[in-house]
Image (cartoon, rainbow, N blue to C red):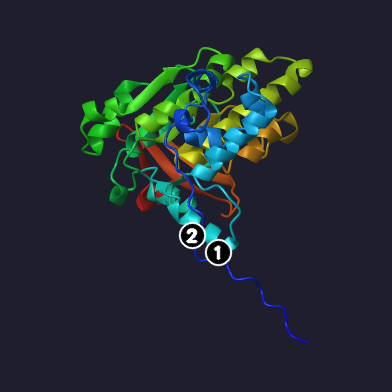
């Protein structure tokens, strides 16, 4: 009995049209293009990662929405791949340095692109300081651990300070004026405004070569506006959609996404390391690829940074310190003296 021959892969693939703007898509007129931009889909990358339901909000029918999404996805080659091909695609993932060698090693090389990294901790633990440092570091050349791009910074608690950016930039021998010009900043005044800023971000990301999106903090407005158990479901649905939008942007543009999160007390575990837990529940937990807990120590400016959750890295913790220069390693002599 003759063995069945497996069909050989075609040596030549049908050439697909690569679109660079949504107005180039077939049968997309100015009115439709404007509707898409109004709801936050200004680029092919954003449209390729959209859902039919999101496009229906612009008055586009289900069938037409499916066609537009499929054309956008075909243009940027979103398709089924083998595990071997996936490994090759993952080679495009880059890492952004935190300025601490120990923390970079803990995170497998630094903050990953195409993923969401969450820092959570109590007030004053240093979450915003890390965000400031990353907004500067992203502009470094690749050989210094940067991504050679700009930062998009959404501030919900009015914690952004340009003075800290200047201190960190000068310590890294970077031109402060240029660094400041490459941080695109917006303050979100409520949760709706926060969501809207991210929905409109794709055009800014593309035009300014943004390689880092920061939301500091992710849950502050949601926590203060959606109070009580009866509003919990609505809050979680909105937060879930917001985070998935961030994740789609990270994947479409190969950028790093960093969020900070507040914590709430857990009286049942008062004397354990789990005495506090991040706000947002399973919604935030499942969407964040890296969850990092920061807590204070008795040492001056020293923080314990613990990797709590990662899909491919073991749990662990390191010491870092926050100084006028930014995030730095704790030297061996300092560790021994503690």
Q: For the residue labelled by badge 1, is the local secondary structure a helix, a strand or a loop? A: helix
> Which residue is more in the foreground, 225 or 19?
19
Residue 150 rendering spot, x and y as whole percentages: 34, 33
Pointer 1 with pointer 2, Cβ within 8 A? yes
Q: Quadrant of residue 323?
A: top left
Q: Is residue 297 visible?
A: no
Residue 72 rendering spot, x and y as whole percentages: 53, 38
Q: Is residue 36 above or below residue 144?
A: above
Q: How many marks?
A: 2
Residue 144, label in figure: none
Residue name at image x 68 percent, y 37 percent: 271
Q: Is residue 174 visible?
A: yes
Residue name at image x 45 percent, y 32 percent: 24
Q: Quadrant of residue 58?
A: top right
The residue at which mark 1 appears reads as 84
Residue 123 rendering spot, x and y as whole percentages: 52, 25
- In the picture, measured across the screen, residue 146 lies left or right of residue 83, that is left
Label 2 neighbour load within 10 Å: few <14, some 14-19, many 20+: few
Residue 221 rendering spot, x and y as whole percentages: 58, 17
Residue name at image x 49 percent, y 55 percent: 89
Q: For the residue labelled by badge 2, is the local secondary structure a helix, a strand or a loop? A: helix
The residue at which mark 2 appears reads as 88
């Amino acid at each position: 009995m003759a063995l069945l021959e497996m069909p050989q892969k075609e040596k030549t693939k049908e050439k697909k049209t690569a679109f660079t703007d949504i107005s180039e898509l077939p049968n997309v007129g100015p009115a439709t293009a404007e509707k898409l931009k109004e709801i936050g889909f200004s680029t092919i990358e954003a449209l390729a990662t959209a859902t039919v339901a999101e496009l229906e909000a612009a008055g586009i029918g289900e069938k037409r929405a499916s066609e537009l999404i499929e054309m956008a996805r075909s243009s940027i080659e979103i398709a089924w791949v083998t595990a071997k091909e996936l490994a090759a695609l993952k080679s495009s993932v880059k890492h952004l340095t935190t300025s601490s060698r120990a923390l970079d090693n803990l995170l497998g090389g630094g903050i990953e692109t195409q993923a969401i990294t969450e820092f959570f901790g109590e007030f004053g633990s240093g979450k915003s300081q890390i965000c400031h440092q990353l907004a500067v570091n992203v502009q470094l050349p690749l050989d210094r651990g940067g991504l050679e791009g700009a930062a998009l910074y959404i501030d919900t608690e009015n914690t952004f300070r340009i003075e800290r950016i200047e201190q960190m930039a000068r310590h890294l021998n970077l031109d402060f004026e240029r660094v400041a010009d490459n941080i695109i900043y917006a303050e979100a005044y409520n949760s709706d405004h926060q969501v809207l800023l991210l929905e409109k971000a794709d055009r800014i990301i593309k035009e300014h070569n943004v390689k880092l999106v920061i939301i500091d903090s992710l849950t502050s407005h949601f926590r203060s506006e959606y109070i009580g158990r009866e509003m919990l479901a609505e809050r979680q649905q909105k937060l879930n959609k917001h985070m998935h939008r961030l994740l789609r942007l990270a994947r479409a543009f190969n950028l790093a996404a960093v969020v900070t999160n507040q914590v709430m007390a857990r009286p049942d575990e008062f004397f354990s390391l789990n005495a506090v837990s991040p706000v947002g529940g399973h919604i935030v937990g499942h969407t964040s690829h890296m969850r990092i807990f920061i807590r204070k120590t008795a040492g001056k400016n020293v923080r314990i940074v613990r990797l709590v959750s990662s899909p491919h890295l073991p749990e662990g913790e390191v010491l870092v310190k926050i100084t006028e220069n930014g995030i730095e390693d704790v030297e061996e002599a300092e560790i021994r003296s503690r």
